[in-house]
Image (cartoon, rainbow, N blue to C red):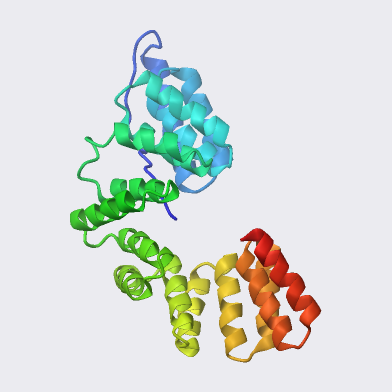
Amino acid sequence: MKIAKYLFIFNIVVFLGSCGTDKTEESIKFFKRGNYKLKDKEYQEAIHWFDESIKQNPKFADAYNNRGLANQKFDKLDDALKDFDKAIELDKKYWEAYYNRSEALAQRGDFQNALTDLEKIAIPFKDSSFYYVSRGNIKTQLQNLSGATADFEKAIQLNPKNAEAYTNHGVIYFENKEYNLAKKDFLKAIEINSAQDFALNNVAYILAEEKKFEEALKYVDAALKINPTQPYYINNKGMILLNLGKLDIAKELIEKSIRLDDKNYLAYQNLGHYFELKGDKSKANENFEKAKNLE
């Protein structure tokens, strides 16, 4: 599930101390350059300029925070966490750095410590809808589904236009196979933001469960238009096409999904169904066994 990101680009805190005014001005200049590169998704360049900013002013908490965001985007999670730690060390009330560290911890799979960071900033973020979405996401990963549901509902109360809150609230219904309630949430998310590809794909899955395959195909195609290389969406389309009798195209998509993610048991399950429909029991059972081992 998606976690909202906080990027505080022009929140410049100037630390004078022993650095001197010239060095402080240089630090801010380099910091701004880093921010522009960060916004342009040129993460290596952004890291370079934040490095230069920190050299001029080693107590510039914002530079550490934003370098952490660039490192995180550049898949350097350990470096990102060190940067967020340093930003917090320099400013114990740097709530946004706690938020960003929580996201990095969650990305690494350390959900308990991610939740601990979010709990520390509950008061300053008490009116933030996206804060509750993020906390709900973490609670979902920790299997605290009642707590997650309460957080998503609080997010919706604070901002009825928060599409992610509806999507993630729907996920809990979806996991419990309460598909009618899940579909209602997903459709609301799509109504608010038609680019909610995760919600589009899940609506497609539910429609397929309802045997409405032609309608399901429209939703999964919409999801793939937004995110064409998402393996779960590709596999879902393959499953729908299997049910529409378009076996060879379905097989191509399912195999493509497996190439992108060979740990998705549903893809092997669908490939097994393909071979079953083709009358090849040996290959069908082989893929069903792979699916069972991965489930």
Q: Is residue 44 above or below residue 90?
A: below
Tell me residue 212's x, y (percent).
Answer: 45, 88
**To which quarter of the image does residue 17 belong?**
top left
Q: Is residue 51 above or below residue 111?
A: above
Residue drawn at x 45%, y 71% as measured from the top left? 202
Given residues 29 and 250, the one toward you in this image is 250
Q: Is residue 149 above or below residue 265?
A: above
Left-right relation of 184 to 241: left
Residue drawn at x 25%, y 53% as measured from the top left? 155
**Can the viewer see residue 48?**
no
Tell me residue 153's x, y (percent).
Answer: 24, 56
**To which quarter of the image does residue 176 belong?**
bottom left
**To which quarter of the image does residue 177 belong?**
bottom left
Given residues 230 and 149, the one toward you in this image is 149
Q: Quadrant of the N terminus?
A: bottom left
Tell me residue 59's x, y (percent).
Answer: 41, 18
**Can the viewer see residue 52?**
yes
Tell me residue 167's x, y (percent).
Answer: 36, 63
Q: Quadrant of the C terminus?
A: bottom right
